Amino acid sequence: MINSSRQPYQGEQISLVISIYLGTTYSHVAWALLEPNQVPQTHIVTGFIGLEDCPSSAAIPSVLFYDQEGRLRAAGTQTLDYEIIFQAHSENWIRTEWFILLLYRDSYPELGNAPQPTLPRCKTVVDVVGDYLRYIASSAQKHFLERASNSADIWELVKDRIQYVISHPKGWRTTQLSQLHKAATLAGFVALNKGSRRLHFVSEGKASLLWWFRDHAGIEDDIKVGNRFIITDAGGGPIIISSFDTTCLDSQHLRLTEANPPCSFLAGSVFVTHAFKQFLEEKLASGGSVYGDPESIEIMISNFDAQVKRTFRHSDRKSAVIFGSYRENEPAFSILAGRFIVEGADMVRFFEPSCEAAERGIRQHVIREGTSIVLVIGELAAIPWFFSEIQRRLQDLPIQFFRSDTPAGDTISQGGIQFYLDCGPFEDLSPG
């Protein structure tokens, strides 16, 4: 049942829950100390190992560096350190990113046309996810020890009974969840063939909706039986749309029953970046620009992904991708003062498959009679152009659009803790 106010923890012994949003490009983690008869407080992990100088950052790049022998050399925010980046280039380390996409292979045969992550020698995707989860868990432990009262003593009490919640895209099957379980075992979350009761999985959409209700305390009073919630998970990989109808249990509570199985499209945030990469390679590398070398293109892609894509708002304005100094100029290739200039129409083209997929999926789930409440989450949800464009395309339908004021990854990681404390009001037709 929906309950926007958190209740005191009813367990008999002190424990700790760590919730992880494992994103395609960025990940997030939160924790809550569970003390009997106390209301749990959720803490977002910041100041990750390797980025102690930026304690306010809650986003962890889903990136790892391996050397040529397959040894892990850096993970997460460590990969942002300029000295590590220089060492990675000089020693020819392997940059492994977007590896989460490899878990989708069984569900998406068309992934052959998607960006292809590079794995180090003798490493499987399960090994890589395990390495990454181990780094995240170490950062969560560091954050807990620095923030909680009597943290060292409490850690000794709870370290062998920590509850882990890992979120995943809606509709993931047994194959993917089994791989996640193996990775969590490699990361030391649970012992081999033991401790499965300490590992929990929840879909990103459910976690987001649970936390959205906490962010909008009292909104359940305005929800009517027959309203439909459509969760549009527009993250890094697929865009996944699922829907739940509200069902009255009594005068004060509602239950959410899955209306239709989810639909998904390979059109998430990484595919916008991939379209930009193809554009660069065609215009600069194939066109003969002096800045068409792999290193310059890599810098442009990184800055596009981190800044330009995330702030795109106006289709009638040009965007500038910074990659060099003011001395870098090549007007014939739209390079001025160290900036690659992208026309608004080209930016729209990069986003078009994502907008079209979201529109098509929402239309499949919307109800014609009554109100549909669309909650948009994930990396694309925070991009002004994407959020306003799907609203414009769907203005003919009776829809109310929402997105959380909290960053998408933080919403999901905190919602995972809420899911653990209260398994939620959901009745499913499909897995996850």
Image: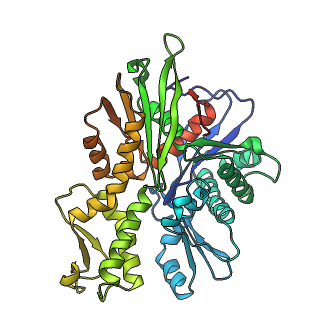
Task: Count the numbered circles shown.
Answer: 0
Q: Residue furthest front?
A: 109
**Of the pair 187 and 237, the residue shown nearer to us:** 237
Position of the N terminus by quadrant: top right
Colour mapping used in the image? rainbow
Q: Left or right of 410: which side holds 300?
A: left
Q: Position of residue 8 (x, y in %)?
A: 61, 26
Q: Please name the residue shown 53% across and 88% down the image.
A: 90
Which one is nearer the viewer's eye here, 128 or 371? 371
Residue 65, percent from left and from top: 58, 74
Image quadrant where one finds the C terminus = top right
Q: Residue furthest left?
A: 316
How far across and how far down the image is residue 390, in percent?
30, 44
Residue 362 is at least partly visible in this image:
yes
Along the viewing direction, whichever of 16 and 343 lies nearer the viewer: 343
Q: Image point 37% across, 66% down: which residue?
A: 275
**Residue 290 in the image: above or below residue 355:** below
Determine the image quadrant of residue 377.
top left
Residue at left offset 74%, top offset 55%:
185
Residue 299 picture location, percent across and down? 38, 76
The residue shown at (71%, 75%) is 122
Residue 47: tell me if it is visible: no
The quadrant where residue 33 appears = top right
**Taking 121 as reference, is 323 left or right?**
left
15 is higher (above) or lower (below) than 248: below
Please identify the residue farthest to the right as the structure is shown.
193
